[in-house]
Image: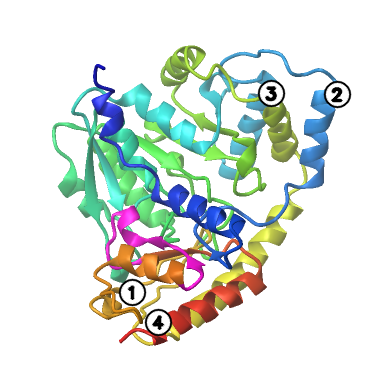
Amino acid sequence: MKSLSTRAQNISPSQTVAIDTLAKELIAQGKDIVSLGAGEPDFPTPPHIRKAACEAIEAGRTRYTAPVGIKEVRDAVCRKLQRENELRYEPSQIVMTSGAKHAVFNALSAILNTNDEVIIPSPYWVTYPELVKYLGGVPKIVNTVAENGFKMTARDLGNAVTPRTKCVIINNPCNPTGAVYSEAELRDIAEVIVKGDLYCISDEVYEHFTYTDKFVSTAAFPGMQERTFLVNGLSKAFCMTGWRIGYVAAPESAAKLIGKFQSQATHHPSDIAQYGALAALDGPFDSVQTMKAAFLGRRDYISGRIAGVPGISVRVPEGAFYLFPDVSSLFGKRAPDGTVLRDSSDFCKYLLTQGLAIVPGSAFGAEGFVRFSYAADMETLRKACDRFETAVSALV
């Protein structure tokens, strides 16, 4: 047999997906596992969104539509961007996608040629560097530190730019750290991007879960909208993870290009999901506010509990719904069975034997840390914290 694609073989599978899948398999086998590995809200999709999708089915709105998405839905995205972000877009600049991950893939596909560099701050969402590699680009990682809130500075970005740099990815609020860039920080970064004539992919899928400063889009600064691929989706704010519906707002020439190759690939996202998105975008916002308040309480609870564990360093996240503590002081210790924990992967494997599933920091380019998702009810978080404390106390 001839060989399979080298390009496909050279990317790594998603560790977050792998851990969540393993946890679900263990639960199906009857094992008692508390899983805080997946970034998935535990709230149900709001009723008005479910109702709109059911009505679309009953009305027979299940035919092929334009590859870029239903015009009515793209109009709603434009209204959202104007209303919430003070950004003016035309429907021709909007492409509906099968989730925000697909929107990132589309944006990178529209930008990258072989060996183009993409600057990615670390810790990063696991998918960014793998998609860059898959498309023939070169991920250029800019390491950040907890002492600076895990945020890339304008100076960091400027120092990383080379003649081969094509794009920078900004995830704000950030998965996995919960970091939120202030307006001043983004303005300085935007100046570097404009000066370097770079593209920017701004992943804003957690925008509604910002607990400190008001959220500001990267596209809002002078010279940025015409070079920004604004990525967002309905999965987090409206609990529509399984619906697989997102969008990218882009310069019109790039949006047309994305529409062209999407017509040859996925064609368009599900009509049913799009009509659900329409109800979400134009509908009531109270469910989002309720969820945000719940996440804030959960954040404070889990941050306090984990910070109280000896040897663990915690930075309270400013956004999203993840906690990213430093557990490096535990490396070198032994589990009850004698296994030496050498890194975050070993530590998470050990925790899984103790009934707790979380994600190693190495998955996000940050060895020494682990990621908890606190998108779970308080009883689940209590169990998780209890198991974490017990597991750590058993190390010698």
Tell me the number on the disc at residue 143: none
Rendered location of residue 299, percent (x, y): 55, 70
Tell me the number on the disc at residue 58: 2
Rendered location of residue 48, percent (x, y): 81, 42
Q: CA distance from mark 2 to mark 4?
A: 53 Å
Q: Which range of residues does the magenta coloring cover?
A: 354-369
- Within the magenta stretch, is there residue 360? yes
Q: Nearer the viewer, mark 3 or mark 1?
A: 1
Residue that label 1 marks: 327
Do tag 1 and tag 2 residues touch (Cβ < 8 Å)? no
Q: Nearer the viewer, mark 2 or mark 4?
A: 4
Residue that label 3 marks: 271
Is residue 380 visible to us here? Answer: yes
Label located before the other in sequence (2 or 3): 2
Q: CA distance from mark 2 to mark 3?
A: 12 Å
Do tag 2 and tag 3 residues touch (Cβ < 8 Å)? no
| Pick the front one: 336 or 110 | 336
Q: CA distance from mark 1 to mark 4?
A: 10 Å
Label located before the other in sequence (2 or 4): 2
- The amino acid type found where label 3 is placed reads Asp
Q: CA distance from mark 3 to mark 1?
A: 44 Å
Q: How many marks?
A: 4
Rendered location of residue 94, percent (x, y): 54, 25
Above-or-below relation of 290 to 216: below
Q: Secondary structure at mark 1?
A: loop
- The amino acid type found where label 4 is placed reads Val
